[in-house]
Amino acid sequence: MRLFYHDAEGRLTGQAACAPTLDELAEFRDRGEMFVVAPDDAAFGQNYVVDGELVARPVAPITINRTEIPADKRSKVKIAGLPDPCTVLIDGEPVTVEGGRLELTADMPATYWVVFDGFPYMPWSAEITAS
């Protein structure tokens, strides 16, 4: 049996393979431990807990129109479908996004990393090349 431990938001925080009795499971709960019994095929990083049940993390409907642009400060990468509001990281720097859309331009050749990791959604990332 596998136990997935979670926090109050449902984020999985740890797991254990064990064979506790029903009394031991009750003792865990009495101590305030938050966990669910996970099926053998459950993927730790792809699930979270809602109302005491293990469910799949949603995938945000994020789209990107292109991953290569000229470094001309006019051409745009358009990213849509982000949760509203959210924070994305661009080369590690946080950027607040409202309205679910982000437009990026570049004025120098470089490769940029855009990362969205907003719980409970599955992480998303893209590499954008400006040349």
Image (cartoon, grey):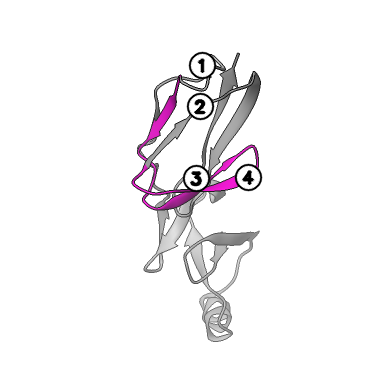
C-alpha gap between disc 1 and disc 2: 8 Å
- In contact (CB < 8 Å): disc 1 and disc 2: yes
Q: Where is residue 45 in the image (x, y as percent from the top left)?
A: 55, 48
What amino acid is at disc 3?
Asp
| Residue at x-position 38% and y-position 49% | 98
Q: Mark 1 points at which residue?
A: 69
Residue 97, image x and y in percent? 44, 47
Q: Which of 113 and 122 is in front in this view?
A: 113
On the rendered image, what quadrant is the C terminus found in?
top right
**Mark 1 residue crowding within 10 angstroms, few (<14) / some (14–19) / many (20+):** some
| Residue of label 2 | 105
Amino acid type of the residue that numbered disc 2 sits on in the rendered structure: Thr
Q: Is residue 26 above or below residue 97?
A: below
Residue at which label 3 appears: 41
Q: Label 3: state its secondary structure.
A: loop
Q: Say if 39 sits above or below 32 in the image.
A: above
Residue at 64% x, 23% y is 111
Label 2 environment density (alpha carbons within 10 Å; few <14, some 14–19, many ≥20): some
Quick check: can you spot residue 121? Answer: yes
Between circles 4 and 3, the one closer to the viewer is: 4
